[in-house]
Image: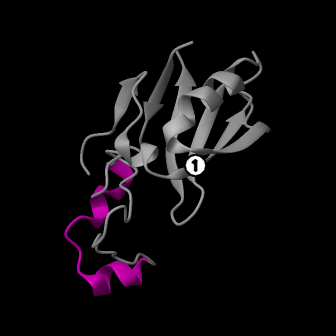
Amino acid sequence: MGFRITGLSAEPFRRLYGLSDRDLAIQGVKRYVADRKPGFPDQIEMRNVAENTYDRVDEVPEVMRVRLLSLRAYVAEGMMLDADVVDGKEIEAVISRCFESSHVAYIHAHNAKRGCYSGRIDRV
């Protein structure tokens, strides 16, 4: 079964581009400098340090391959049905297992250690 991975849209964040650290802080935002690899993943382009939303079929971005991930499977109404933790090198097996259930509409991938939301996975 095929799958499609997409990152976040850059649109909600464009208003923050170019702001000083002070102006970001006023809005409750903290700037982080990606100074190591793997470091702070970009959830838009789905690479390590964003303008174009990642959107690929049957391709896992490298930023997911090198991390421990928490995959959370949801029904269309938004309730979590299943979850698992997987080494990014083995992600396809867990995606396939989750999508064996016809009730699973989509999967959210989260970085299991440092980091947060990584991307959305839909069946194709």
Residue 113 sits above or below residue 11 on the image: below
- Which one is in front, 34 or 89? 89
Q: Nearer the viewer, residue 67 or 71?
A: 67
Quarter of the image where one finds residue 22:
bottom left
Relative to 1, does residue 16 appear above or below in the rendering?
Answer: below
Apparent side of residue 92 relative to residue 97 in the rendered image (left or right): left
Q: Residue furthest left?
A: 18
The residue that appears at 28% across and 56% down in the rendered structure is 14
Residue 69 spot, x, y in % from top left: 58, 49
Badge 1 crowding class, 10 Å Cα cut-off, few under 14, some 14 to 19, many 20 or more, is: many
Q: Which residues are magenta?
A: 11-27
Amino acid type assigned to the residue bearing label 1 in the image? Leu
Q: Label the magenta part by its dominant secondary structure.
A: helix
Q: Is residue 118 left or right of residue 56?
A: right
- Residue 75 located left or right of residue 70: right
Residue 40 spot, x, y in % from top left: 38, 64
- Residue 65: name its quadrant: top left
**Is the image coloured rainbow, by chain, by secondary structure, or in one colour?**
one colour
The answer to if 95 sits in the magenta stretch is no
Percent across and percent down for residue 9 are 38, 43
| Residue 14 shown in magenta | yes
User: Percent position (x, y) of residue 85?
Assistant: 67, 47
Residue on which disc 1 sits: 69
Name the element at disc 1.
strand
Q: Residue at point 55% right, 25% down?
A: 122
Q: Which residue is at 42% across, 33% downward?
A: 60
Looking at the picture, tell me which residue is in the foreground, 37 or 121: 37
Q: Is residue 110 above or below residue 52?
A: below
